[in-house]
Image (spheres, rainbow, N blue to C red):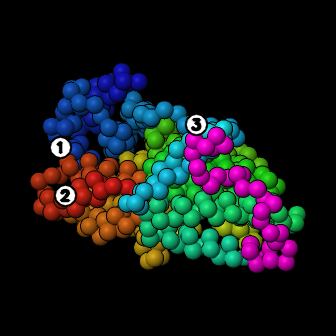
Amino acid sequence: MLQESWEFGPELRRRRMAAGLSLQQLGQRVHYSKSQLSKVERELKRPTPELARLCDTELGARGAPTRLVPVRGSQPSLPGPESDDEVWLMQLRKDGSSSFQPVTRRDVIAGAASALTLGATDPRVLPPVPGGAETLVEASRMLFDQFRRLGQVSGPAGVLPSLIAQTHSLEQFARCSGPRARRDLLLLASRYAEYAGWMAQESGDDTAAIWWTERAVQLAAAGRDTVLAAYAQVRRSLISLYRGDVEDAAQLAEHALHSDASARVRGLAAQHLAQARAVEGDYDSCMRSLDRSRDLLERSCVETGQPVLGASHVPDVVSMFTGWCLYDLGRPREAAVHLDTETARIPAHAFRTRARYGVRRALAHAAAGDVDHACAITAEVLPSVRLIHSSTVRSDLHRLFRTLGRHARQRSVRALVPDLTDALTSRTT
């Protein structure tokens, strides 16, 4: 694959000359300097996937140059569902940070570690919940909504321990409840576990994110709900996208899309498939997947009383994803229009969501050459970035830093760099 990226330079030169463009003219269109493009063409510098997509779009190459710079994850493949013999311990530190550590149940029993673990509590020590089961379920649902609100204004460490404890408690109450209450409690516990998985990913721990997502699937299956099994593939697809493993992301999304899951889960799968196709430079396939996503989500209905799966603070999630896909397709100016419109509709209290799409909006404007505007957006969103301590948002912030670095002499960039650097180097908790 390294050889492929070196073949990009001669191919870029051939297509640029066929289009009758000088290095300076192409550089002005993709907002790269003439010297940078010259080094890429002469194979003195490896091209980035972003540059490949921008050149692809400007030269009307329909994905050919993009395919010469394949995106490959640098991390090992994601683990599958772990054996029931493994237990995860969560360590909380005085500074508010946390981490997970896998141990075996034998170690726990032997006294090598001490923790409250899922399944370790004897249900006989809990009182039965006959008449109070419905109240417990209702209160826990309301509490879940509050945890989601809290997750919008704090780092993962602010909600993850409570989510884990609540998941454990609901599972234990389910063990000593009647059949109907048991199902409701297990399904709700599965939603808590799924959100714990998302917060684990936000903290930068992909392995824990997968573990908790699989735990959510197990709890849902115990409550006779198979929806989360397909949704787990959607979540794994997203993790693979962030890790740069586009092929794995597409395969997981395809599998969920063609499953017998609910329309909402398949609609979310179609979104991730669209994003994978966008990174690959396949415009037509990307747009078809987005159209399919919109159709499925419009036909979906949320199960009464169950928390909604996927983004809950984005009014039109398909339009928002369309904006980001256009960026990945090397069409940053079109992307900026979509992201401007949809970001303005995000609720004011949803700081995590606003930070995520605010950074992406700034990145689109920067790639389109609107550097001053990109810096203004970034300055506005950085307080939210510091507040929510998101590993996934930080990965986009790194891309923004590199993009703005191409315009290091511009006054707005020089003014922003200290705060942007501080946000990137501050510790994620």
Question: Which label sits in the foreground, 1 or 2?
Answer: 2
Return the residue at label 2: 417
Which residue is found at the position 22% from the left and 45% from the top?
32
Which residue is found at the position 35% from the left and 27% from the top?
5
* Residue 43: numbered disc: none
Return the residue at label 1: 33
Mark 1 lies on a secondary structure that is loop
Q: Residue furthest top?
A: 3
Q: In the image, is residue 122 part of the stretch drawn in magenta?
A: yes
Report the magenta residues as a range. Answer: 108-137
Q: In the image, is residue 116 part of the stretch drawn in magenta?
A: yes
Mark 3 lies on a secondary structure that is loop
Predominant SS of the magenta segment: loop
Q: Position of residue 427 (x, y in %)?
A: 33, 55
Give the camera-side residue of 38 and 357. Answer: 357
* Residue 79: numbered disc: 3
Question: Which label sits in the foreground, 1 or 3?
Answer: 3
Mark 1 to mark 2: distance in Å? 20 Å
* Residue 14 in view here: no
Q: Position of residue 363 (x, y in %)?
A: 33, 56
| Amino acid type at image mark 1 | Ser
Image quadrant assignment for residue 390: bottom left
Mark 2 to mark 3: distance in Å? 37 Å
- Crowd class of label 2 (few under 14; some 14 to 19; many from 20; radius 10 Å): some
Give the camera-side residue of 140 and 5. Answer: 140
Image quadrant assignment for residue 25: top left
The earlier-in-sequence mark between 1 and 3 is: 1
Q: Quadrant of the C terminus?
A: bottom left
- Crowd class of label 1 (few under 14; some 14 to 19; many from 20; radius 10 Å): some
